[in-house]
Image (cartoon, grey):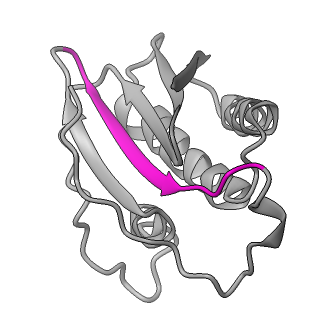
Amino acid sequence: MSLSRHRRFPRSRASVRDARAFVRQVLTGWGHTDRLDDITLCVSELATNALLHGAPPGREYCVTLTLDGSVIRLAVRDSGDRQLDIDVPEADWEACSGRGLRLVREVADDMGVTQQVVGKSVWVAFKSVSPSKGAGRSLTDAPTRLPVVPQS
C-alpha cells in the first residue's frame, strides 16, 4: 500500500518553515518518525534551493511525500528551467553557501533529479522502520542505500 501527500508553497522564505511543518505533520500522522530529523533537514535544503534557484517569481514549488512500504520519498518540484547537477563539487572552505546538496546526499539513502516537461523534481529517499520498531533505532545505525529507481 502506498500513501502520498503533497502541498504547494509560495516562493517566500517563510514557506521553508511551513514545508518543514508539513513534513513533520505528515510523517507523524503516518507513524514514521524514525528519520524525521533527516527528512526535515532535507526538505529545508531542497525547498530553499527551489525558492532561490528554481521557482520563478510569482510561482510556487510543491513538496510531495510518499510512503511505499518501508521507503519514504520526499520530492520538491519547481517550475524553473535551471538544470541541476546533484554531483556538486566541494564548496570553498571560506564560502558561506554551497554545502546543502552535499549534506542532503549524505543524509538520504538515495537522491536524484527528474526533469519534468516544465521544471524538475529533486527527490530523496529514506529507508524507514515500521512504526512499532522506530523507537529502538540508534543514532549509530547506518542507513541502507537504496537502489536508484527512475521516477516519471
Residue 80: x and y in percent read 29, 24
Q: Is residue 90 above or below residue 134?
A: below
Q: How many marks?
A: 0
141 or 24: nearer the eye?
141
Q: Is 127 covered by the magenta stretch?
A: yes
Residue 120 within the segment the image draws in magenta? yes
Name the quarter where the C terminus is drawn.
Answer: top left
Identified at 48% across, 22% down, the residue is 61
**Can you tell which quarter of the image residue 7 is in?**
top right
Residue depicted at x 54% and y 43%: 48
Which residue in the rendered view is the most extreme toward the top? 58
The picture places residue 131, in percent across and down from the top left corner, at 76, 49
Residue at image coords 61%, 52%: 39
Residue name at image x 56 percent, y 23 percent: 3
x, y percentage for residue 65?
A: 55, 31
Q: Is residue 113 left or right of residue 29?
A: left
Which residues are drawn in magenta?
118-131
**In-front residue for pair 151/58:** 151
- Position of residue 1 relative to residue 21, above or below, is above
Left or right: residue 101 versus residue 7 is left
Give x and y (percent) for residue 19: 67, 32
Within the image, what quadrant is residue 22 found in? top right
From the viewer's perspective, is residue 115 above or below residue 79?
Answer: below
State left or right for residue 1 relative to residue 10: left
